[in-house]
Every structure is written in C-alpha cells, then in structure tokens.
Image (cartoon, rainbow, N blue to C red):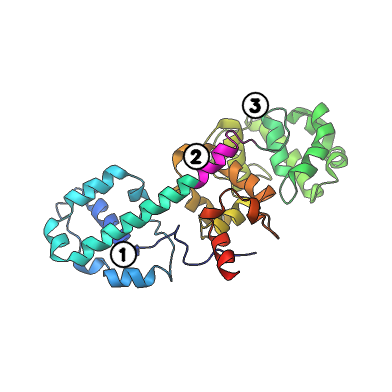
Amino acid sequence: MSQPPTNSPLIYNCGNVGQSLKTFKDSRNSGSDNTSISRNSTPSLVKIITTLPENPHIGASLVPFMNNTTLLFFISFSINLKLLFSNIKNLICLILFVTLYTMQAEIVNKIFEVFSKNNENPKTELVYKNNFTLLVAVILSAQATDVSVNLATKSLFEIYDTPEKILGLGEEGLKKYIKSIGLFNSKAKNVIALCQILISNYDSKVPNNFEELVKLPGVGRKTANVVLNCLFGLPTMAVDTHVFRVAKRIGLAKGNTPEAVEKELLQIIDGKWLSHAHHWLILHGRYICKARKPDCEICPIKEYCEYYKSATKII
C-alpha cells in the first residue's frame, strides 16, 4: 500500500512548543501564579525548521489548544511578554506554528467542502430495516463487502428483523442465510449471543453509547462508531480499511493503527463535517482512491492530496 510522503504539509510538529503550552494551561488550571515558560522548554527556530520535514506528526498535545481560537489570542497576550520579546526566536517559533496550523486547517476544510459539494448527505450502503438489523449488518460486514452483506441479508431481514426472531431461527438456521459471507460460522455465533444479551439486558434495543456497544459479541470499535453515527447521529469516526488508506494517502493522518488514525481525524476535522466525514472517506476509498490502483485523474481532491503530488513529481 502506498504511503504519503513524510514531509506532508498537512501534518506538523512543534513538540516542545506544545509541551510549553500544556504547561502554561496546567498552571492556569491549578491556580498557580507562575505562568512563565522555561526558556529551555522552547526549541529554537532553526531546530523547528530542520526537524519539521523529518518528523511531520502533529503533536497531540497541541490540538486541544489550536482548535480554540480564543485560547490562541489569550496565549498571545498572557504569556510573559518579557520572555517572548527577550528571545525573538521563541516568538517567531510560535508564529510559525500558528501559521502552519492555519494552513493545515484550511486545506482540510477545502477537502471536505469538495466532498460535501459532490455528495451533501452521504449514507451507509448497507441495507437495513431498523436499528437492530443495521447492527447485525455491520457485524456481518467485517472483512466482507457491503454488496455481499446486502445480498445475504435481503431475504434474512424480510422475515427475521428482531432479536427474538433471529434467536428463534437459531445458529444453524442463521448460517444458511449468511454462508456466502466470510467467517460466517463465527459471525452466526456472535449474532445469536448478541440477540440473547439484547433481549436480557437492553429490552431488545440497541444501546446508544460506545461503552455498552463494545461489550456486545462481535462489536468492536469500528462497528460501535458506525452504529452511533448512522443510528444516533453522533459525530464519530469509524475507521475501516478505506478510511485508513485514504486518510494516510491524502495526508490527513500518519497513525499506524485504526485507533490512532481515528484520533488524528477527530482532532483535525472541523466539527461541522464530522457527522458525514467517515461516509465521505469510505465512499472516496471505495470508488476512487482504491487500494491497488487509485483513480487519481478523476479525483476531485487531487490538488490537496500528498500521494498525487508525490506521484506527479516522480513522473
């Protein structure tokens, strides 16, 4: 799988500056009068410039600060002025980081503006009848395509669309409907166990919070996030293989695990896009930014994509 170049302009690191800002905020929260920042805690401008291309990750500690414009202004006026102006490098470093972050945020917004313009209200491609059938469909979709799941559940959900009905069907009966789906044996076992728990503990209703969902058989982090987003409208980020690939190719994330990418995306994507963001990324990965051969020529966001920029430079 192709990786985005390590000098992606979408992702930056000023780690020591982030730690300084965190120290500053912690001192405010603790009620301490000492709001000065150690001169040694802030890197020189030369160090920032030389290390950015080598280590482009955005410091996680910075994001909570940078998402709050008000806090930026507060920092500008509240941090010890004598310290800032006695060492001009520190001031320039802070300005540099703010500038880079602003550029990053603008690019991310442009990407999702394009997605929104092309598909204002994206939906899951899984076919379902109610909350329960969506939960089952998402469980069945693990390591399978939505198309294969829809083919298998079409006749299943016509008759068996509640926990009680599927429990009555039994594990062996369920297997007959879903045998065309990968891992159908273990999935059938999980769905039957799921039905028992929903009936016993949740009055046959699908829980609407993450902690309860991930306790259910066959429900992992991705499945829980899909359910919370699709059924309850929560701004979650479900990272499947498509989201993982697209986020890294474009340059939105650098994490090496789905959970790490999820956290990065939640930090970098503006809240106004989050209710649809994972659908846009999934559909983009499914139909344009494909795993083996991305169709860059018809990609509507190629001008912002680090993978495309790198490929065209090589050519």
**Residue behind mark 1:** 16
**Circles 3 and 1: CB distance less than 8 Å?**
no
Give how far across and how far down residue 42 sits, in percent: 25, 66
Residue to which mark 2 is pinned: 273
**Label 2, residues with CA under 10 Å away: few <14, some 14-19, many ≥20:** some
Look at discs 1 and 2 and give the one toward the viewer: 2
Callout 3 amino acid: Asp
Labelled pair 2, 3 in contact (Cβ < 8 Å): no
Q: Label 1 amino acid?
A: Asn
Q: Nearer the viewer, residue 193 or 271?
A: 271
- At a point 71% along the width and 48% down the height, the residue shown is 142
Q: Is residue 163 left or right of residue 10?
A: right
Looking at the image, residue 64 sits to the left or right of residue 77; the answer is right
Under circle 2, the secondary element is helix
Q: Amino acid at mark 2?
A: Trp
Q: Residue at x 48, y 46 (%)?
A: 110
